[in-house]
Image (spheres, rainbow, N blue to C red):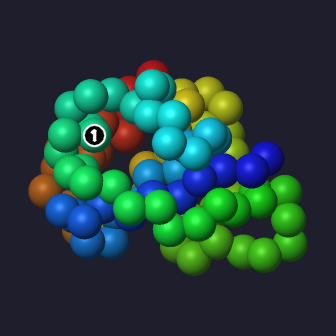
Amino acid sequence: MLCAIYKSKKKPGSYLYIQKRDDFSVVPGNLLEYFGTLEIVMMFNLSGNKPLHHADKNEVEEKIKSQGFYLQIPKQDDGLFNSLSEIK
């Protein structure tokens, strides 16, 4: 599976993975608002041999398939992301 990885300019260390580049229709509006301006980092093949930093490729793929996106956040956050990461 190919996915697009975006970083938040507003929340350093926070990344959003979606299946189709620039298609944020599956991402909750409040999450997009909180993330602020998103900047594309890269397209990534989750089926390839290259590892992801700070994320498990299988978990990323499973979340994209089940909820449409995967949210990668720093270990310490303000609590909002914890509730949003469970949105289905």
Spot occupied by residue 19 in the image (x, y as percentages of width and height): 63, 41
Mark 1 secondary-structure assignment:
helix
Q: Residues within 10 Å of mark 1 (few under 14, many from 20)?
A: some
Residue positioned 38% across, 61% down in the render = 39
* Type of amino acid under label 1: Leu
Q: Is residue 56 above or below residue 4?
A: below
Q: How many marks?
A: 1
Image vertical order of residue 53 relative to residue 48, above or below: below
Rendered image quadrant of residue 52: bottom right
Which residue is at the front of the view, 21 or 26? 21
Horizontal placement of 38 versus 4: left or right? left
In the picture as drawn, the residue positioned furthest to the front comes out as 22
Residue 40 pos. (x, y %): 47, 61
Give x and y (percent) for residue 15.
41, 60
**76 sits left or right of 71 in the view:** left
Q: Residue at horizontal 61%, vertical 28%?
A: 66
Residue 75 in sight here: no
Residue under circle 1?
Answer: 32
Image quarter of the C terminus: top left
Residue 4 seen? yes
Give above or below for 10 relative to 21: below
Q: Residue at x 50, y 68 (%)?
A: 41
Q: Is residue 77 left or right of residue 43?
A: left
The image quadrant of residue 9 is: bottom left
Give the x, y percent position of residue 60: 62, 50
Residue at horizontal 55 percent and vertical 31 percent from the top: 68
| Residue 82 position by quadrant | top left
